[in-house]
Image: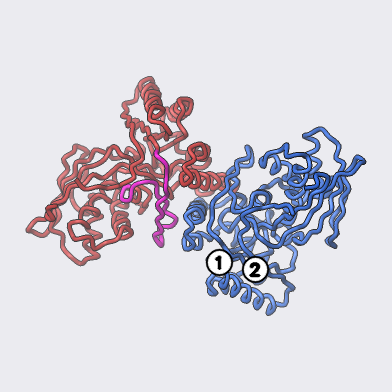
Chain colours: A red, B blue
């Protein structure tokens, strides 16, 4: 490996996993961003976007840049880097686009520096990128992006990250091309929840964790129920109810809003079920007349990888 | 085995497990009730208590009786039984005394009848007993009592019970002999909880389930935190804060209120730690001047057993 330059794939992620608002997330095989970080001989952090998403390239305002600056501040060093980003995960899709940028950048930088930092450190730095993107330091996309698989963030202060074992899962995603801003999606949530609903929710979370760790697909499916967030947020996503209903009829285990939306994801035990779900999704959004993109992919057990 | 008569041990249980209000429970090796059910040649259900707790013996008002009547109603049969109960789990202790009576009775009856019923059926019948005791049909003591180990009740309607694997755990319990009625302990809970606290709680529940299933004692300890119920209910239990603080200092993984109290339990990885915790508990309540009883026991993996 040329230690002056590193290229990585940084995967899309699904946060919340229906009942696990703010604590659970998983990584997808696709889509992913491609990023290259290389050493230069002059102080500064140059950011080049090979995509046309119109993202800021000024380091402090760029998600990757903010995460890298946080890392270099801890080292008390001035960066001498050029970062090239080919962003394939569309910003605002609800698929962890900003997390892929933030986690990918610090992962690459840590490799170039000779790996002085732990995963917990990298998550901490990457959260500065998330703050630039949404105003909130959250880790439920960053963590599965970095580590792969399904991850639990038990606590952010102090950071307590647990990787959960999980069976093979096929994942179908539809991204209706409408805008749902993370900040708006947070705004509409009620600040208080009825204790009865909270109890139902934590039964489902416990069931989902147990189902994943036991490899019990039926239990995973039964536990993918959200009585608190989904009823409020799904209103922002045209076609949500129909997509969910038809996906379940096609055999999906369950699913819901990816992160704060607008993407919708469905988990399936078999690839052919996931493919049937994709057909339903296409039909729903073609009929509504909203532009959309679908992905038929799998649970990604590796997280960010070099290539 | 004489099929006209059966004797069983029905164990004490701890519901809630700090962060898992209404969904988690575990069974203890001690204390336990001893019950004998025998066929008679005349219609009716005779209940005899060998203890001095002053519990009603009229079947419809007795916890065991109500559970047995629910079972016989489903069979459309008139019971011809004599039930003898030696109740060693003190009613009102928060250690699942009523659940032991209800679950023990239906377990024994099912054996005498040739096991026509599933565990789910037995849990359903036993909940009629819980309703007599506290006015609420809950299953978080009944289920671990019957099945042993740590159990998750993901949902009551429909009933969805999951047994969670768990490492060996030593459990210290102190029962301060004050009265906390389950109905009162429910009454003082707030009907609404802040979303932020709910999120913290479900992070802990997910962490506890993962910790148990991974056999990660440190994670179990970190997850034994309740930001919703304990701050309210612990006010009803003199000495709670001091018991908890000193138990943690003595090396306990964590713990809290057993069920709706007043008993307090602490989990430990090692037996000697659990013994040190017991000493702290004794000192706290001796100093306060409240009568108390302590138990040094283990996680019971078998649930109800015949002997």
Name the quadrant containing residue B245.
Answer: bottom right
Q: Which mark is residue B103?
A: none
The residue located at (82%, 50%) in the rendering is B62
The residue located at (69%, 78%) in the rendering is B286
Give the left or right position of residue A298, taking residue B69 as reference: left
* SS type, badge 1: strand
Residue farthest toward the left in the current orientation of the protein: A41
Residue farthest toward the top in the current orientation of the protein: A287
Residue farthest toward the front in the current orientation of the protein: B1
Give the left or right position of residue B151, taking residue A299 as reference: right
> Which one is in front, B6 or A73?
B6
Give the residue at mark 1.
B268
Reply above or below: A35 against B307.
above
Residue A295: x, y in percent? Answer: 32, 32
Quarter of the image that includes the C terminus of chain A: top left
Q: Earlier in the sequence, mark 2 or mark 1?
A: 1
Asked if the magenta segment contains residue B24, the reply would be no
> Which one is in front, A257 or B75?
B75
| Mark 2 and mark 1 on one chain | yes
Magenta region: A145-168
Q: Chain of mark 1?
A: B
Residue B40: x, y in percent? Answer: 89, 44
Mark 2–mark 1 Cα distance, whole angstroms, equals 10 Å
* SS type, badge 2: strand
The residue located at (41%, 62%) in the rendering is A158
Give the residue at mark 2.
B296
Asked if the magenta segment contains residue A148, the reply would be yes
Name the quadrant containing residue A297.
Answer: top left
Reply above or below: A297 against B236.
above
């Amino acid at each position: 490996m040329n230690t002056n330059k590193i290229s990585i794939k940084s995967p899309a992620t699904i946060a919340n996993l229906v009942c696990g608002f703010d604590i659970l997330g998983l990584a997808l095989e696709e889509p992913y961003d491609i990023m290259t970080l290389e050493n230069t001989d002059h102080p500064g952090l140059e950011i080049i976007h090979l995509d046309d998403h119109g993202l800021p390239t000024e380091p402090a305002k760029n998600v990757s840049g903010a995460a890298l600056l946080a890392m270099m501040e801890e080292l008390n060093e001035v960066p001498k880097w050029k970062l090239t980003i080919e962003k394939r995960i569309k910003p605002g899709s609800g698929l962890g686009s900003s997390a892929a940028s933030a986690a990918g950048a610090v992962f690459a930088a840590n490799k170039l520096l000779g790996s002085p930092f732990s995963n917990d450190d990298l998550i901490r730095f990457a959260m500065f990128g998330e703050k630039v993107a949404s105003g909130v330091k959250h880790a439920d996309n960053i963590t599965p992006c970095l580590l792969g698989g399904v991850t639990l963030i038990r606590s952010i202060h102090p950071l307590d990250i647990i990787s959960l074992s999980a069976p093979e899962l096929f994942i179908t995603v539809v991204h209706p091309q409408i805008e749902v801003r993370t900040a708006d999606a947070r705004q509409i949530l009620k600040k208080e929840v009825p204790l009865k609903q909270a109890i139902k929710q934590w039964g489902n979370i416990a069931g989902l964790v147990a189902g994943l760790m036991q490899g019990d697909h039926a239990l995973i499916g039964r536990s993918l129920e959200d009585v608190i967030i989904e009823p409020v947020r799904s209103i922002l996503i045209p076609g949500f109810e129909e997509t969910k209903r038809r996906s379940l009829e096609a055999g999906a285990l369950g699913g819901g809003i990816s992160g704060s939306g607008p993407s919708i994801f469905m988990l399936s035990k078999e690839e052919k079920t996931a493919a049937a779900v994709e057909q339903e999704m296409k039909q729903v959004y073609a009929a509504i007349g909203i532009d959309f993109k679908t992905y038929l992919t799998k649970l990604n057990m590796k997280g960010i990888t070099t290539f």
